[in-house]
Every structure is written in structure tokens, then in C-alpha cells.
Image (cartoon, rainbow, N blue to C red):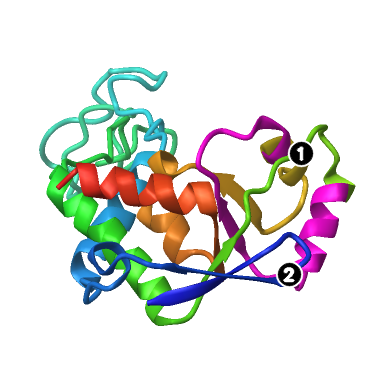
Amino acid sequence: MELSVINSKGEDTGRKVTLSDAIFGLEPNEHVMYLDVKQYLANQRQGTHKSKQRNEVHGTTKKLKKQKGTGGARAGSMKSGVFVGGGRIFGPQPRDYGFKLNKKTKRLARLSALSSLAKDGKVSVVENITMSAVKTKDFAAILAGLKLNNGKKTLLVTGAVEKNVILSARNIQRVSVATPVALNTHDLLNTDTLLLSEDGLTALEQLYTSAE
């Protein structure tokens, strides 16, 4: 697949780049993408939920009534979960929601997400974007030139960590900046436009070519 390279004003530079079929030309595997997104969301959960069991609530442990002859169920303590103020029966306890996913599965998931974006025509290539200072206004002007100031989600991939670009973009809603190493399936599937800088595309291809 060939794409035209545009500049920061949205103008065609007359140059073209060829997207690697090994990265952008696969048949997307929906199941592995689901697993990778599921793991990502599971890892975001703190798992600190906690309710008190009967051994943790305050209350008397005196037997409430005699065992037999009352016509009611046996009751040994006010701390039982069947009484108001008692412990919670089978309540939530701290836990880790994460689970293991093989590296090859995660790699296939990300390649599937990239291929899916390319298949849907959501990938664009732009000249390298650099900023001499942190200015949100200047970065917003770049987005306007690229016609990406329409409120839709945009993910910019740069070849290296561009601190000024990251800081200039962080206050703009629905816009995020990442390097190829930091990309994950969730963010790829959660964007409307994948904007690759030329260095970002090169680094992305090197990353997944060297991982084969």
C-alpha cells in the first residue's frame, strides 16, 4: 500500500511511502485483539475493593438465643452476614485482575490493529513534526492544517520521544502522542486517525521487523 507524504500544513509533498505488508497488510485477527485489549483494561484495575467479613466487623460474639426450640434458624452471633451490621457474605477482596498473554499473541494483536486501520483508510503519513518550544496553540495550528481539528481521536506516532510535541498536545482533547514501543492495541483501536511521522513509520517497521 502506498501513501502520499503530507507536510504539517496538509499539503502533498509529492513523495510517497510504501507500507509494509508484513505490518499493515495482514488479515486482522479479532480474537487476539480482543484478548490484548482485555488484558490492557484488566491491568488498569487497581483491585483494591474490600468489604469486611464477619471476623472484621465490630459486634458481640455472644450467642443470641438458644440453639433449639425457638422455631427459627440457628443464630450464633450478631456478626453473621444475615444480620444488619454483620459482615458481608462473599464480599469483594483485594485481587490482581491481570493475566498472562504470550508475546507472540500480543505482537499479532498489534499488527492486526495496524492492518485494520490501514484497511479502513485511517493511516496517514506526515513529515517529521518537531517543536522548538512547548506551545499548545502551535500544535493546534498543525492539527488544523492537517484537518484533524474535527473533534475525532488522533494518535500521532513519532520516531523518538519529542518532549515539546508531547507537552504541547497533552491539553488537546482526543489527541495523543506515542512512540512505536509505547503503542498498544487498545489505543490503536480507539483512534480515528493514525498519524505516522516519517521517522515514526521507519521506527515502527524496524521494531516489528527485528522482532520476527
Residue drawn at the location 39% of the way across and 20% of the way down: 59
Q: Is residue 203 visible?
A: yes
Q: Residue furthest right?
A: 137
Q: Is residue 207 left or right of residue 164?
A: left
Residue drawn at the location 33% of the way across and 70% of the way down: 115
Element on which disc 2 rests: loop
Q: Which mark is residue 173?
A: none
Amino acid type shown at disc 1: Met
Q: Which mark is residue 131?
A: 1
Q: Judge by depth and name the residue closer to the eye, 102 or 108.
A: 108
Q: Is residue 41 visible?
A: no
Residue 145 inside the magenta-drawn segment: yes
Q: Is residue 72 above or below residue 155?
A: above
In percent of width and height, residue 114 lies at 36, 65
| Quarter of image, res 65 | top left
In percent of width and height, residue 85 lies at 44, 34
Which residue is the site of mark 2?
Answer: 10
Q: Is residue 138 left or right of residue 42?
A: right
Q: Residues within 10 Å of mark 2 (few under 14, many from 20)?
A: some
In percent of width and height, residue 136 lies at 84, 45
Element on which disc 1 rests: loop
| Quarter of image, res 70 | top left
Q: Is residue 197 left or right of residue 163?
A: left
Q: Residues within 10 Å of mark 1 (few under 14, many from 20)?
A: some
Which callout, 2 or 1, points at the residue further toward the start of the chain?
2
- Figure quadrant of the N terminus: bottom left
Q: Is residue 37 above or below residue 84?
A: below
Residue 112 inside the magenta-drawn segment: no
Stretch of the chain drawn in magenta: 138-165
Q: Judge by depth and name the residue closer to the eye, 158 or 42.
A: 158
Residue drawn at the location 27% of the way across and 33% of the way down: 96
